[in-house]
Amino acid sequence: MRKILEDLWYGNICPQNDSYQPTKEKKELMEYITLHHNKLRATLTEKQKEVLEKFDDCHAELSSINEREIFVYAFQLGARIAIEVMHSDTEQS
């Protein structure tokens, strides 16, 4: 347990990077997003491009907040499951 906590402390564990699994489905979706984003951007005025950039920034920030909240929830749920499992073992003895 100490090794895991030390790895977390020193930044050797990075769930947002370590959990990413590039799949064919994700790659294709990212290509479509990029293609359509670039097509849309090519049709915009400079002012509209600024608005799109702000939209993209806000969307990225919201995604980051959602990912953080999901991570915290999943970690807490996992801890509660582990506690319940450990507690149920002592009840059966």
Image (tube, rainbow, N blue to C red):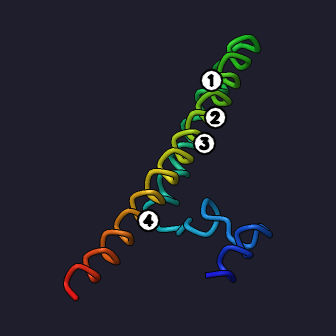
Residue 10 lies in what quarter of the image? bottom right
Query: In the image, which is nearer the foreground, mark 1 or mark 4?
Result: 4
Q: Residue at x 68, y 14 (%)?
A: 48
Q: Nearer the viewer, residue 39 or 75?
A: 75
Name the image quarter holding residue 76: bottom left
Query: Which one is earlier in the sequence, the residue at label 1 or at label 4?
Result: 1
Disc 1 from disc 4: Cα separation: 36 Å
Q: Which residue occupies 54% across, 51% down?
A: 30
Q: Secondary structure at mark 1?
A: helix
Chain-order first, disc 2 or disc 1? 1
Instruction: Tell me whether circle 2 and circle 3 mark residues in contact (CB < 8 Å).
Output: yes
Q: Categorize mark 4 by other alpha carbons within 10 Å: few (<14), some (14-19), many (20+).
A: few
Dot 2: within a 10 Å radius of its alpha carbon, few (fewer than 14), some, or many (20 or more) residues? Answer: few
How far apart marks 2 and 4 lie (CA) works out to 27 Å
Which quadrant would residue 87 be assigned to in this image? bottom left
Decide: few, some or many residues near mark 3? Use Cα within 10 Å; few <14, some 14-19, many ≥20: few
Mark 1: give few (<14), some (14-19) or many (20+) Cα within 10 Å.
few
